[in-house]
Image (tube, rainbow, N blue to C red):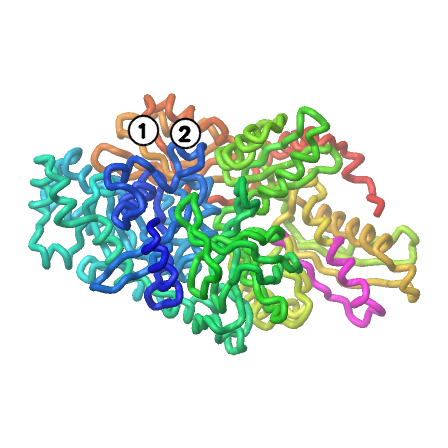
């Protein structure tokens, strides 16, 4: 990056109206990284010749080897639009569903996204996911239809047929925006060819066009077809350069931080937007107190940990102390820098509205809020991915002396990627790693462990089931404390379906209710819970709910935190096979407590409540829920038989089928337990021509005839006996 460009960037960083924070998002293999290359070439960061081949933003060895983006990557560039320079902070995101957590975190960082679709394939499952992720964070989308040359060379479409295909794709994108956006934005954010919020082109050939440019330059679809067929795409790229068309579209149609933060802050920050710091964030005030959010943590061999930070208020300065709200620690900023792919350009300070790399946040994690130590605020809303981890593997070091290195590695990785869940099973001594898929665990855990020289034993994939309850406990279950001086009476029943569904969709989040929460009360009442019950909610954990229905019990408030801990323990390991519970409502209906606080400490309260909760759930006829994936399979129509047989052989269910241009799309639902090895089996059954993509994940009851077998397998894997599960636990 030339010295004069760095100087321009420094100047633009203080002009938020001339900043655009954008992401490039799409289904896998639709051309995001190739598009990024072409944009970088246009900005003079890489050579024109290497653009589309260098894959500049895929700088990790694994990404080059696998040919896919695994980690989101940042770069800052300058673009001149109508005589004015603009700073564009761009994030190239992964397209594979297993790395969707990186996309979710990138959405918190940016204010707008370029949604990319393949002109031939159109809207695909991951296209829907990224649009859903964007509008959930109030991030505005625009559309780029890539690989238009495929329509010309492969499908040989006429101009009218091309326009018809574009119209269909644009309509599908707009339907998704309207489906997932809030009412205020569902029409405002739809894309439109006439206003130029849609562009068409070829990232590989470095040309792009939009309707306003076609009208201005007199280039028609026929001209594009002729140039492509004659091999004159280089000349076409000179007439309609991709970087100019796309970045002009970004400047015109995506918001600057000044505009975006006005409507984004009250969505992503739970604090009072009328407070001093709230006003500072909504107005993007460079003179306000510092507030930022860490959206990515990654190791640098020279600098230690580098944190990607989006600044929402104030300035971040080299040498200053900042407070980490989640960790409740103070760290000192050692370096502040601007991104240039894997390189960083050092800065002394950076103002609000920018995306920067920060060294010195040694205790931070992805999703951490940072602020001034003398002005501690409420943290940002947690960054939550749409899908839960459904694949788990057990990892153990081959050499006991490497155990400490393994633990350090797992802790570090969970900071970098919170969608990976790591749990230590103290009974078996194994480390359980849960991810969004087998590739997620392989790329983020197994491969890096090998690179670090840590030899581990990795189990076959494990499915984590859920334990649920069918009916209300017939009568209150008593739990006695070990000293027999305290008694707790508990009833369990299934959560109202609408409330459970709201938990699954993320409308109702896990939370500890310490004071009156009118918003939550109104929400659960609207979903079917009685008003009296809604006032008694004390804790939502693991999609289960604890209510305090006691009246006039002496010292109940003093033991409530211990009751909550016992409830957490009980729903994290259910009574059937110590699998997590889901959709269970537990009510503490009465308690008899010793007058002296010394006789009602944690060692007495927690085991008593935990046993009562588990027994109450057991008496309510517990059953097992299994995870299922809804997938889309695309296969040549003549190979449909092989694909449907593969689905049916795995306890799958075909939901619907559609056919277009000799390709059949099959929407199916399959148990995750039956999905291992599905990709290779599908290829084998369809002559290598079948592909599948994830649409959604849900939990449904396990067939009754399979339940005893599955419970037995889980117990065997965990080394549990019936006696161990039934025996009362000691504190």
Q: Residue 690, how many percent across, how many down?
A: 34, 29
Please say whether residue 108 is visible from this viewpoint: no
- Numbered circle sitting on residue 39: none
Crowding at dot 1, Cα within 10 Å, few <14 / some 14-19 / many 20+, comes out as many
Quadrant in the picture for residue 508: bottom right
Q: Residue at x 58, y 62 (%)?
A: 320
Camera-side residue: 499 or 623? 499
Query: Which residue, given by chain and number where applicable, does mark 2 sit on?
Result: 65
Q: Residue at x 27, y 57 (%)?
A: 79
Residue 717 point in image, percent of width and height = 67, 30
Give the left or right position of residue 265, taking residue 641 as reference.
right
The picture places residue 184, in percent across and down from the top left corner, at 36, 69
Q: Nearer the viewer, residue 283 or 188?
A: 283
Residue found at the very far front of the displayed protein: 3
| Front-lying residue, 553 or 243 | 243
Of marks 1 and 2, which one's residue comes earlier in the chain?
2
User: Is the residue 438 above or below the residue 265 in the image?
Assistant: above
Relative to 684, does residue 366 appear above or below in the rendering? below
Q: Which residues are magenta?
A: 542-566
Residue 194 drawn above or below residue 156: below
Q: Quadrant of residue 625?
A: top right
Q: Residue at x 16, y 48 (%)?
A: 164
Residue 337 visible somewhere in the drawing: yes
x%, y% of residue 728? 83, 43
Separation of residues labelled 1 and 2 (CA atoms): 32 Å
Residue indicated by mark 1 = 640
Q: Is residue 558 one of those drawn in magenta?
A: yes
Could you say whether the residue bearing mark 1 is in a helix, strand or loop? helix
């Amino acid at each position: 990056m030339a010295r004069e460009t760095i100087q321009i960037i420094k100047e633009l960083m203080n002009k938020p109206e001339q900043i655009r924070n954008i992401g490039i998002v799409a289904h896998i293999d639709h051309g995001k990284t190739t598009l990024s290359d072409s944009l970088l070439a246009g900005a003079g960061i890489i050579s024109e010749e290497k653009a589309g081949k260098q894959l500049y933003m895929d700088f990790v060895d694994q990404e080059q080897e696998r040919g896919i983006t695994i980690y989101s990557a940042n770069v800052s560039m300058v673009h001149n639009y109508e005589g004015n320079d603009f700073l564009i902070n761009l994030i190239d995101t992964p397209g594979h569903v297993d790395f969707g957590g990186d996309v979710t975190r990138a959405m918190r960082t940016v204010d707008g996204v370029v949604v990319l679709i393949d002109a031939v394939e159109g809207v695909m499952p991951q296209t829907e996911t990224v649009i859903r992720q964007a509008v959930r964070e109030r991030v505005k989308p625009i559309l780029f239809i890539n690989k238009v040359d495929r329509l010309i060379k492969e499908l040989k479409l006429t101009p009218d047929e091309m326009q018809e295909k574009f119209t269909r794709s644009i309509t599908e994108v707009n339907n998704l925006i309207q489906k997932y956006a809030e009412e205020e934005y569902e029409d405002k954010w739809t894309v439109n060819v006439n206003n130029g919020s849609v562009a068409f082109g070829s990232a590989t050939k470095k040309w792009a066009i939009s309707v306003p440019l076609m009208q201005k330059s007199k280039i028609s679809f026929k001209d594009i077809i002729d140039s492509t067929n004659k091999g004159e795409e280089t000349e076409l790229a000179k007439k309609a350069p991709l970087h100019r068309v796309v970045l002009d579209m970004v400047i015109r149609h995506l918001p600057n931080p000044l505009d975006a933060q006005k409507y984004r802050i009250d969505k992503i920050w739970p604090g009072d937007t009328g407070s001093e710091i709230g006003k500072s964030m909504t107005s993007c005030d460079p003179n306000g107190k510092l507030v930022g959010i860490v959206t990515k943590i990654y190791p640098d061999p020279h600098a230690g940990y580098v944190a990607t930070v989006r600044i929402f208020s104030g300035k971040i300065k080299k040498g200053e102390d900042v407070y980490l709200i989640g960790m409740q620690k103070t760290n000192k900023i050692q370096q502040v820098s601007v991104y240039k792919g894997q390189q960083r350009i050092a800065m002394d300070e950076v103002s609000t509205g920018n995306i920067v790399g920060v060294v010195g946040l040694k205790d931070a994690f992805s999703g951490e809020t940072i602020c001034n130590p003398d002005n501690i605020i409420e943290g940002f809303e947690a960054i939550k991915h749409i899908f839960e981890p459904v694949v788990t593997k057990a990892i153990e070091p081959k050499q006991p002396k490497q155990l400490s290195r393994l633990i350090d590695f797992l802790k570090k990785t969970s900071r970098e990627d919170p969608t990976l869940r790591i749990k230590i099973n103290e009974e078996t001594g194994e480390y359980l790693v849960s991810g969004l898929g087998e590739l997620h665990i392989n790329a983020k855990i197994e491969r890096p462990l090998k690179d670090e020289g840590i030899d581990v034993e990795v189990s076959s994939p494990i499915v984590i089931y859920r334990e649920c309850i069918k009916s209300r406990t017939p009568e209150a279950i008593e739990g006695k404390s070990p000293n027999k001086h305290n008694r707790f009476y508990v009833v369990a029943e299934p959560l109202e379906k609408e409330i459970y569904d709201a938990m699954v969709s993320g409308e109702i989040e896990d939370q500890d209710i310490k004071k009156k929460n009118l918003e939550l009360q109104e929400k659960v009442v609207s979903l079917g819970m009685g008003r009296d019950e809604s006032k008694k909610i004390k804790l939502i954990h693991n999609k289960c709910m604890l209510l305090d229905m006691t009246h006039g019990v002496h010292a109940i408030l003093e033991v409530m935190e211990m009751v909550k801990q016992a409830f957490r323990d009980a729903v994290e390991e259910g009574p059937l096979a110590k699998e997590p519970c889901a959709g269970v409502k537990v009510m503490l209906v009465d308690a008899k407590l010793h007058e002296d606080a010394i006789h009602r400490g944690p060692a007495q309260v927690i085991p008593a409540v935990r046993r009562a909760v588990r027994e109450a759930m057991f008496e309510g006829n517990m059953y097992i829920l299994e995870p299922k994936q809804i997938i889309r399979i695309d296969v040549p129509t003549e190979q449909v038989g092989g694909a449907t047989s593969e689905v049916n052989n795995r306890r799958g269910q075909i939901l619907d089928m559609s056919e277009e241009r000799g390709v059949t799309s099959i929407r199916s639902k399959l148990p995750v337990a039956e999905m291992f090895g599905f990709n290779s089996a599908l290829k084998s059954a369809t002559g290598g021509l079948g592909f599948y993509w994830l649409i959604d994940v849900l939990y449904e009851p396990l067939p009754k005839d399979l339940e005893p077998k599955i419970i037995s397998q889980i117990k065997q894997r965990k080394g549990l006996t019936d006696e161990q599960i039934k025996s009362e636990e000691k504190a």
